Amino acid sequence: MLMTKAPTIDPVSPSTPDASRILGMQRIVSLVYAGRDVTPLWNELMQRVTADPTDAAAFMDLAIILQTLGRTEEARQILKNAVQLRRDFSVVHGNGTGRHLLAFVTEGDFMANTPLDFLLAGSNCVLLLRYVNLEVTEITDLPDHDVAFMAIGESTENAPLLAHMQKLLAGFDGLVMNRNPELIAGLTRDGVSATLAGEPSILSPSTHRVSRDDLAAIGAGAKQLNDCAQGLTFPLVVRPISTHAGNGMELIAGPAELAAFLAVQPASELYVAPFIDFRGADGFYNKQRVVFIDGKAFASHMALSDHWIVHYLSAGMGQSPAKRAVEQAWMEDFDHDFAVRHQESFAALCRHIKLDYFGIDCAELPDGRLLVFELDVAMVVHNMDDPVIYPYKQVAMRKLFDGFVDAISRKASAAR
């Protein structure tokens, strides 16, 4: 059994014979997130690939199931197999009568590409996925679509492909949202901090890339921190390059702790940044996720935690009506409260990040500045939380999703 929680569901197959059509990330991840048993679906997909080893769509959905269950390496191999069989896939939302959005995507986990499938939840849009790699020499033979979207996110692994896409898109006449792979490639943690360094309304902690050898020398007392990361002092936040969700991230108080950290952390290069105490007046570390669509800010989620590494799933939001009440007020009042207080910061972000879509993780500092932890085009944005426990989130996320679909429609209409 892949999952044993909650009652089983009937397998759901695409209702048309289109060989490119998949269930997709939003539908499958939602089932697993809700604790549903996906074994019947898994068995059906396995029967399909056994009967037809060229059924790329079935392989793609199998890869999504495995990725959702944390079986990353298996998922990666099956995804690779699927893309070798075909490079175009489709996800139909609702009745499929809405706009057709074509996305240039790459192989990878759920943070490799903009979460377009989630953003289209509840719409009638069709998402068309075109997998690209360094072997693609021109953008041709595209399926019919209204708007295209450059969905590949920033990472060390994606950097060569983003550079390649910059060249390919230069010769492409079609309308493409987020049509700036070079800018996306620059959304590294150190790149973002450097970009926002001169904005008085924003604090984006000065972030440095430092080699393991240099950090080891600091831990051993052979070098000073200032020699490798000018202006930084302990305590520090240290994390490996190209990690998300706090993976491998530690708060380091001094050289001895740094040495101990490196003893169990094999990364050859790490990000080093000052630790900022962003606890609110309530004593919690409050972190907000905000999404920008065509320059307009939308509330995505807010988490309150006792720990400085704030994860929504581990912050106890589901167990605390008081915390949820804070998030509800933040979401419901967002347009005339948080967004108004930080309108200068939001304008600065959009001025620097000239993209149709991006997101930030942030917090509000006591002095009124916006503390920006991360800025990316591939942050997970979803409406999968239990509507009984989080009824207010359904309203906020519907507003965000509608804003995204409206942006697609505006672009499509303007291109006529």
Image (cartoon, rainbow, N blue to C red):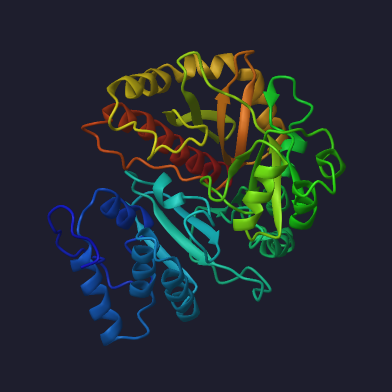
Q: Is residue 98 in view?
A: yes
Drawn side of residue 330 relative to residue 194, left or right: left
Drawn side of residue 201 relative to residue 127, left or right: right
Who is closer to the viewer here, 326 or 175? Answer: 326
Q: Extreme left residue here? A: 7
Picture coordinates of residue 43, whole percent (x, y) = 21, 73
Residue at the spot 41% in from the left edge and 38% down from the top edge? 401
* Residue 374, above or below 144: above
- Quarter location, residue 275: top right
Residue at the spot 52% in from the left edge and 63% down from the top edge? 108
* Residue 34, above or below 253: below
Picture coordinates of residue 111, whole percent (x, y) = 51, 53
Drawn side of residue 221 relative to residue 275, left or right: right
- Quarter location, residue 253: top right
Picture coordinates of residue 3, whole percent (x, y) = 22, 61
Residue at the spot 23% in from the left edge and 80% down from the top edge? 47
